[in-house]
Structures are given as structure tokens and as C-alpha cells.
Image (cartoon, rainbow, N blue to C red):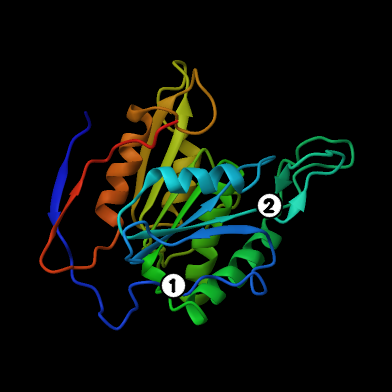
Amino acid sequence: MSDVYIREHETSSTALPRVMPSPKSSRIPVPFFYSPSDDGTDENLLILLHGLGDTHKPFSNLGHRLKLPQTAILALRAPDQIPYLYEEAFQWYDSFDPLGELIRYPNPTPALNLMKQVLQHLVNDCAWREDRLHLFGFAQGGSVAAEFGLSWWKEQKGKFGSIVSVGGPLLSYPTIEDLSPTPLLVVHRVSPDEPSLPRDAMVAFKRAYQSVSGETLDGRRSGMPSSKDEWEPIMHFWSEKLSKRQIDGLYEVMSGMVPPS
């Protein structure tokens, strides 16, 4: 049984609707899955970004299983199909050269432009506040989430509710003085020979964000977090960062339970 966190609801603006307008496919140029919160109060929006070679479909299922309180979910599919693969395998930006080798220093600009278009629609048309938006990305999707959080801050001075990057390093090496205030959790798998997060990776994150937390997972496995122990630090991070709307003076019990596999 995981730890239980009990906290009083924080009051948020009553001017915001309890159920937010759904995003429009005419305004988001990639396939997506959207679902309002199961409890009928859309106080937060969790934006899910899949990894290289995947689609948004498994992440829409993940969003449902997480059952985060007062949290709607939006799972986005990357825009480009990986060349020469005749299956549902997509990339957020060009990842392979003409010989099929991974590009060492890819350019994420197309993905950042896409995310900017999505965010403008969410904020301008769907009434979402930036600080109620939470990004979760795996591998290449984690890199996109972290790079976009930085670019949005530099261009708009916009702060998100939080960003979680699982196995997704920054692709750039920031040189800014005014760091983004968005809280960032970096989750990385490590092997017995590498018992901590790569130093260079963490230095880059800390040159971009004011608040950076790091968690390590067992490097003998691969892929997404897959057990209660591996999800626990992420759930705990969200329990501290998700906004809560007060409803008739109720208290919320956050069990931090892991979504079933």
C-alpha cells in the first residue's frame, strides 16, 4: 500500500468553468485524444507526449488509468511518420539521416512550433490557464516537453504547472540568466555502473529551470515506469503540483496508487 497524502483543497478562481471546452481538431494539426476529468472538475490538464516510434494511443490509455484528481487529459500524436516504416510509428522531429542512422544533434523546432499552436488554442479558445497545464513526456516526447517549456518561457514568459520528462534530455544547452520557474521532474533509468543521473544532462536542465528534481529508475529495465515503486515519485510530484479547487470544504485523499498495467 502506498503512502496516503491528505490535504485541504486550495481555492482557485471561480471565474473558470468546472468543465473546460474540448479542443477542436480543426485547431490542432495532429491526431489527439482528449478526455475531461473523471470527477467532473477540470482544474488541470495533463498533456501527454509519447516517445520515438510510438503513437498517442497508449498514452491516452495511460491518462485514463492515472485517474489524477480534477485533471483532464490530452494525448498528442507526433506529426511525422518515421520514413520507411509501414506501421504506426511517429516522430516529433527528423530523427534519422538518409542512411537510417539517428541524427546526433536533431532540430526540435518543428515540434516546438506544433506545441506553440496547441498551447495557443488551449489558452485562447479553451480557457485554460498556463499554470494549470502539466506536461508529461517519455524519451523524445520528454525532450519536446522540456524544450517547449523553455521556449515558451523565453517567448511568452509563461509558467506551466509542471513538466515531467522520463528519459528525455534537453537537446540544447541553455545560456539564459532568467530561468523558467516551471517545476521540472527529470526521471532517468540508470545502471549499476551509473548510479545517478548523467551530470551533463542535469547541468543543462539546471541552466534552464529554477526548480529541477531528479529521480532514478532501475536501468536493468527499459521503457516507461512499470511498477508501483517506479510511479511513486511521479505521483508524489503531481500531488504537490496539481491545483485543487475547493468544493464545499471537502478534503481530498490522494493515495498515489499506480495505474494498473
Q: What element carries label 2?
A: loop
Instruction: Label 1: state its secondary structure.
Output: loop
* Number of numbered discs visible in the structure rendering: 2
**Residue at 54% in and 30% down:** 223
| Vertical position of residue 193 compared to residue 243: above or below | above
Query: Residue 99: image x %, image y %?
Result: 89, 36
Percent position of residue 140, x then y: 61, 45
Q: Is residue 110 left or right of residue 125?
A: right
Residue under label 1, please give it: 158
If the image is split into quadrants, where does the C terminus sit? Answer: top left
Q: Is residue 62 above or below residue 127?
A: above
Query: Is 252 on the left-hand or right-hand side of 52?
Result: left
Q: Where is residue 24 in the image (x, y as percent from the top left)?
A: 60, 72
Q: Is residue 33 left or right of residue 243?
A: right
Left or right of 3 in this view: 256: right
- Residue identified by numbered label 2: 92
Foreground mark, 2 or 1?
2
The CA distance from mark 2 to mark 1 is 22 Å
Task: Kindly identify the amino acid type of the residue bearing the numbered disc 2.
Answer: Trp
**In the rendered image, is residue 170 in sight?**
no
Q: Residue at x 38, y 72 (%)?
A: 19
Residue at the image point whose x is 64% and y is 74% from the top: 27
Near mark 2 (Cα within 10 A), the count class, few <14, some 14-19 or many ≥20, is many
Whether residue 196 is situated above or below residue 121 in the rendered picture: above
Q: Earlier in the sequence, mark 2 or mark 1?
A: 2
Q: Nearer the viewer, residue 190 or 115?
A: 115
| Front one among 122 and 26 | 26
Q: In which quarter of the image is the N terminus?
A: top left
> Whole-percent x and y of residue 84?
87, 39
Where on the picture, by quarter, is residue 158? bottom left
Amino acid on which the number 1 mark rests in the picture: Gly
